[in-house]
Image (cartoon, helix red, strand yellow):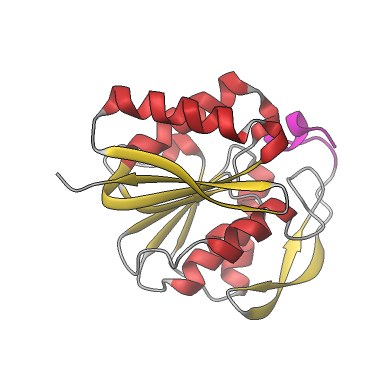
């Protein structure tokens, strides 16, 4: 399946759900996936690296998963921070349907699954986590990050996981340049490398 397939708004082919068993936030759970979305067979390596290394999300406020897929990141956020509102966004309508279904299966009523244009413009995020869709190309990826990263709240962090050999270091350079044009209260670094993946961190200081 190509990246264009899972990044399209309406994947082709019938929706054939299947149950898989995964570990999220230290819990063994059963979720549903299907073809036409990213990593339908389970938690992909990049997401696993992200979830292994990130600190706990903010305990309250607004949390964001950019490109939620069937929901491993958003569901983990919701399990770790039950008092927070988790916004799970994806352009893929099938991914959104499955993510919402998985939130219901796990009894998580703090997950809101939406397309990007449905998120109210005034919401700022106290934590952002993402395994962004690198293979869609720089133009689309940059547009995605330009939309969301500047919406970090004061004293908040965003964590991205990017494969080292798919341009993680050059992406970090671009993120720094992009955010410098937004304001001087942002910083970006790469605090961790694991299994060929970089963890990129964006912080916004209070002002």
Q: Tell whether 145 sits left or right of 170.
A: left
Residue 112's spot in the image, x, y percent? 46, 56
Which quadrant does the N terminus fall into?
top right
Which quadrant does the C terminus fall into?
top left
Do we see residue 5 in this rendering? yes
168 and 124: which one is in front?
168
Q: Quick one: which residue is furthest to the bottom in this view?
A: 27
Looking at the rendered structure, the number of numbered marks drawn on it comes to 0
Q: Reply yes or no: does residue 117 show up in magenta.
A: no
Q: Quadrant of residue 120 in the image?
A: top left
Q: Is residue 60 above or below residue 120?
A: below
Q: Tell whether 7 sits left or right of 152.
A: right
Q: Is residue 2 above or below residue 100?
A: above
* Residue under the point 61% across and 79% down: 26
Q: Quadrant of residue 52 in the image?
A: bottom right
Residue 169's spot in the image, x, y percent? 57, 33
* Residue under the point 77% across and 60% down: 42
Q: Is residue 19 above or below residue 154?
A: below
* Residue under the point 80% across and 49% down: 15
Q: Which residues are magenta?
A: 1-13
Q: Tell whether 8 sits left or right of 126.
A: right
Q: Main secondary structure of the magenta part?
A: loop
* Residue under the point 70% across and 30% down: 135
Residue 183's spot in the image, x, y percent? 24, 29
Q: Reply yes or no: does residue 8 show up in magenta.
A: yes
Q: Tell whether 52 sits left or right of 190.
A: right
């Amino acid at each position: 399946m190509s990246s264009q397939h899972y990044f399209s708004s309406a994947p082709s082919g019938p929706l054939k759900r299947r149950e898989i068993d995964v570990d999220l936030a230290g819990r063994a759970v059963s979720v549903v996936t299907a073809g036409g979305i990213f990593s339908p067979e389970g938690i992909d390596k990049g997401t696993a690296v992200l979830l292994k290394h990130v600190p706990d999300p903010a305990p309250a406020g607004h949390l964001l998963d950019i490109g939620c897929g069937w929901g491993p990141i958003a569901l983990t956020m919701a399990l770790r921070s039950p008092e927070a509102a988790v916004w799970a966004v994806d352009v893929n309508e099938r991914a959104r349907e499955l993510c919402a279904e998985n939130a219901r299966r796990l009894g998580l009523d703090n997950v809101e699954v939406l397309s990007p244009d449905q998120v109210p413009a005034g919401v700022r995020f106290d934590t952002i986590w993402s395994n962004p869709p690198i293979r869609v190309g720089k133009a689309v990826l940059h547009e995605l990050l330009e939309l969301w990263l500047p919406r970090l709240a004061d004293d908040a962090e965003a964590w991205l996981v990017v494969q080292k050999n798919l341009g993680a270091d050059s992406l970090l350079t671009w993120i720094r340049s992009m955010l410098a044009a937004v304001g001087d209260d942002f910083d970006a670094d790469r605090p961790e490398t694991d299994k060929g993946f970089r963890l990129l961190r964006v912080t916004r200081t209070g002002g």
